[in-house]
Amino acid sequence: MLGVVDMVLRPSRSAAAAAAAVLLAATGFVALCSAGPGGGIAVDSGPLARSPDRTLCSHLIEPAGYPCAEHTVETKDGYLLALQRVSSGNREFGAEGAPPVLLQHGLFMAGDVWFLDSPVQSLGFILADHGFDVWVGNVRGTRWSHGHVSLSEKDKDFWDWSWEELALYDLAEMIRYISSITSSKVFLVGHSQGTIMSLAALTQPAIAEMVKAAALLCPISYLGHVSAPLVLRMVSMHLDQMVVAMGIHQLNFRSEIGVNLLDSVCDGHIECNDLLTSITGKNCCFNNSRVDFYLEYEPHPSSSKNLRHLFQMIRKGSFAMYDYGFFKNMKMYGQLKPPAFDLKSIPQTLPLWMGYGGNDALADVADLQLTLEELQSKPELLYIEKYGHVDFIVGLKAKEDVYDHMIEFFTSFGKSLSS
């Protein structure tokens, strides 16, 4: 959902297999999340378990021949986020005329998602080759980030956040840091949950002031028209509430038992493209042969509270802060219902570009229309009828279909960039 969990939950050909996957999600969730002291996995068993020597720069970017530097940003609530700064091989960091651009990933993803294909296909490399000063965001809880100043990942409180905090603390602090280092306004790119974060953050004048323009892939502020059958089934089953009630606070699909279970459902029995469709919509251009490589990096952990906040958006059709219930809402917000994020607060002068697909079952066209009606500005739109949710980040022809248009949009607001 809203990320490369799309890739992990590999798909079924029949309604019966899809129903089996729902049953696994409902009854096997404790196994997938393997409750530890903090309600989640105590030790990540995947190949990218956190280590000081295993950075995104050294693991994925520098081997492709691109200079990369690691930065750490501390949020107001104490989380230590990893930022990578990437340049092309023939340019120095922050070279004159290189405008900074921040790439913000989606749910169950991290900054590696922008570099999973070849340099001529991956947006992070493509932007660097076009002369941008590329910065790569990694939110709290992902394996590339660095934990918290005082909390352990085993602590329940470490996972007490949703996309609201990711927008107002993580994204805000990353933008502030980049703007300070570069003495420049920042171009912002988001995909899926990264667009929820971006739109929420840009309603805050102090954050919007630091952004020069924003490009949103599969833009989401409303989720009331989600049509993905598997997602809707999970919402109707109140899976998010079940997980929280079981005391599970971290969602980590990289547990050995979880990966083996999902592999066993798919391997030799199910062709792995229909369940993906039932979660994200039909993806026209996704390279199925690279799934095993993608799974070396995705998915990354997130919080149960974050999933619940997303499901609240689906149930209520709202773009609002986290709903704690009437009594706690009064304590937190001074009102019975959580405050909405007012899209009209995004400055009319802030240029926006949006790329969306006709087969996206998560970022639905009807919900996007609601977003467009509330915005003061008229974003530049790119509609690709055949594209689904995943095609925008790992589509075989995404450069020609999407990224070239995005780069043209950005370059129209700044100095000429090298091609």
Image (cartoon, rainbow, N blue to C red):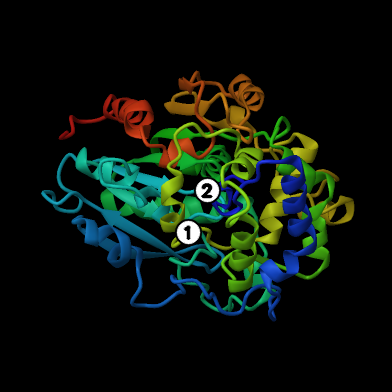
Task: Judge left or right: residue 113 versus residue 192.
Answer: left
> For residue 287, which quarter of the picture?
top left
Q: Is residue 158 above or below residue 101?
A: below
Residue 96 coordinates in the image, percent (x, y): 15, 43
Query: How much space separates mark 1 and mark 2, taking CA atoms?
Result: 15 Å
Residue 299 coordinates in the image, percent (x, y): 53, 58
Residue 295 image label: 1
Callout 1: 10 Å neighbours few (<14), some, many (20+)?
A: some
Q: Amino acid at mark 1?
A: Leu
Q: Is residue 15 visible?
A: yes
- State the residue position of label 2: 106
Residue 192 coordinates in the image, percent (x, y): 54, 41
Callout 2: 10 Å neighbours few (<14), some, many (20+)?
A: many
403 and 322: which one is in front? 403
Q: Is the C terminus in the top left, top right, bottom left or bottom right quadrant?
A: top left
267 and 283: which one is in front? 267
Q: Secondary structure at mark 1?
A: loop
> For residue 246, which quarter of the picture?
bottom right
Q: Is residue 160 above or below residue 17?
A: below
Q: Residue at x 51, y 76 (%)?
A: 149
238 and 101: which one is in front? 238
Residue that sits furthest to the left in the current view: 90
Residue 320 coordinates in the image, percent (x, y): 70, 41
Residue 53 image label: none
> For residue 41, which quarter of the picture?
bottom right
Q: Residue at x 33, y 51 (%)?
A: 135
Q: Is residue 205 above or below residue 84?
A: above
Please state which of the two labelled residues, at mark 1 or mark 2, is closer to the viewer: 1
Q: Amino acid at mark 2?
A: Gly
Q: Is residue 248 above or below residue 310?
A: below
Q: Residue at x 83, y 45 (%)?
A: 335
Q: Secondary structure at mark 2?
A: loop
